[in-house]
Image (cartoon, rainbow, N blue to C red):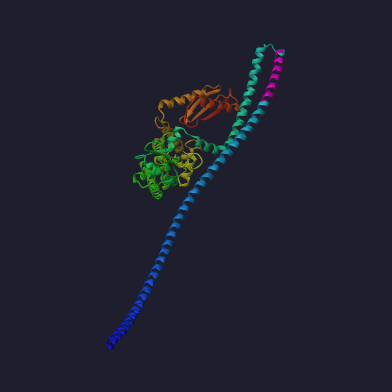
Amino acid sequence: MSTIASIIGGLAVGAIVGWLIKDFFDKGKLQQRKDEAEKVLKEAKLKSEEILRKADLDGKELLYKLRVDFEKQNASKKEELFQLEKRLIQREENLEKRLDFIENKERELEGREENVKKISSEIEKKDGALKQLIEEEKEKLRMISSLTQAEARDLLLRRYEEELRSEKAKMIRDMEETIKEESEKTARELVSLAIQRCAVEQTTESTVSVVQLPNDEIKGRIIGREGRNIRSFEMATGVDLVIDDTPEAVNLSSFDPIRREIARISLEKLVQDGRIHPARIEEIVEKTKQEFDKQLTEEGKAAAFELGIHNLHPELIKILGKLKYRTSFGQNALQHSREVAFIMGVLAAEMGLDIRLAKKAGLLHDVGKAVDHQVEGTHAQIGADLLRKYGESEIVINAAEAHHEEKEFTSLYSLLALVADAISASRPGARRETLETYIKRLTQLEAIANTFAGVDKSYAIQAGREIRVIIQPTKVKDEEVSLLAHEIKKKIEGEMDYPGNIKITAIRELRVVEYAK
């Protein structure tokens, strides 16, 4: 029994010891696992903090990019709105100017109507007084002469008709002076309105270039998103790009032929290249301008070399090149200048003058036409100013400013320039007129002038741009010359079709010759 008890006690002790050992080991594993768990938690916490920092940085970077993109888009929209506002302001200013102009015209018309009413009332008064005087004169004539009533009436009517004609001529001359003074003030407004309203074929022909396109789809690329490409093109070239329903074509409109030609070449290059966007447009236009400047210089050099003219100023050579893109009544200005130079050279050779100087004066006589759309004044005066600026001789300068008789001739070369210019301009075919039409116009011009009483002879000169009327001094008085010129002008305007203007010069001269024996 005791053995059994001791065995049982040993087993109990062993169980207790085993349990204690197991409990010890279990507590050690638990502590180890707690340490591992704390380590895992710490690593997870570090990783989560790193992820949060990275997410915060990515969020800030994304927010910055979104803010930059928004600011760019906002700046672009602001620029578009600024441009639209600027255009609206310009349109409002133009409308205000037009309204002011119309109001001024209305006030002028009201003033003229009042003047007309006053003049009409004065004429009625004078007419009443005149009738009374006529009756008194009739009575006196019947009492003191043997004239019949009809003869007396005819005599009085002729007498007062002459007096009224003289007064009418004076009134017309006074009105012409008034019109000249007022026209200088309103000339620019009238010209601007005329340009805006002008829709004749000649204007379209001389201010529009057509660019052919491979297909109609490219029109959309030329316009660009919200019209940015077409705006960039118009700003870079200074030319209006007109896109309408014309199949496979667009129009370039400008009064400056140089700008229009640069725009045409640039657009053709862009269409051929296919890359059409604002940056490419500016690049192509700038490159075309540089190439075109070289081309103008080459054209001027070729013209000067053809005529054997050397040592011209580089700017004058470039201006000569510009004449290739200038026309007058359909005649190319550079070709016309070449013709004048050749003709002047032949005439100078026949007269024993300096041939090279004559050719030089002929080639440069119309240089003002290259810039007359940019500078105020006649092309003859503009050309003379340019030649004076670039150090040409006074002979060449005078030939340019006097070839339309705007200045006095100071040398024979100026007279040759006048003659050669008229020959080149008036030859059949030079200015889109047949010889038959040209002769018919000159004949009709002289015939109209010769129909008026008191006209002795008339001569159409300057290729029909001027007619000189020789008046008989015994039949027309000095104060009646203005009236006669005015009546000739009215009849020419009513019965003839002609390009440009016709100058009417009425000449009245009384010469008395006596011989002492």
For the point 66% across and 17% down, the residue is: 156
Residue 389 vertical position relative to residue 442 in the rendered view, above or below: below
Residue 496 placement (x, y as % from top left): 49, 26
Q: Nearer the viewer, residue 51 or 427?
A: 51
Q: From what the image shows, is residue 389 above or below residue 150?
A: below
* Numbered circles on residues, count: 0
Residue in the image at 35% along x and 76% along y: 30
Query: In this image, 494 relative to 251: left or right?
Result: right
Dividing the picture into quadrants, the one containing residue 333 is top left
- Image height of 207 relative to 169, above or below: below
* Main secondary structure along the magenta-highlighted residues: helix
Q: Which of 27 and 455 is in front in this view?
A: 27
Residue 125 part of the magenta-drawn span: yes
First to last magenta residue range: 122-142
Residue 125: where, in percent of width, then height?
A: 69, 24
Is residue 400 inside the magenta stretch? no
In the rendered image, the quadrant that contains the C terminus is top right
Tell me, yes or no, if residue 103 can be seen here. yes
Q: Residue at x 41, y 29 (%)?
A: 433
Image x and y of residue 490, in percent: 54, 26
Q: Position of residue 338 (x, y in %)?
A: 39, 38
Q: Is residue 426 above or below residue 270?
A: above
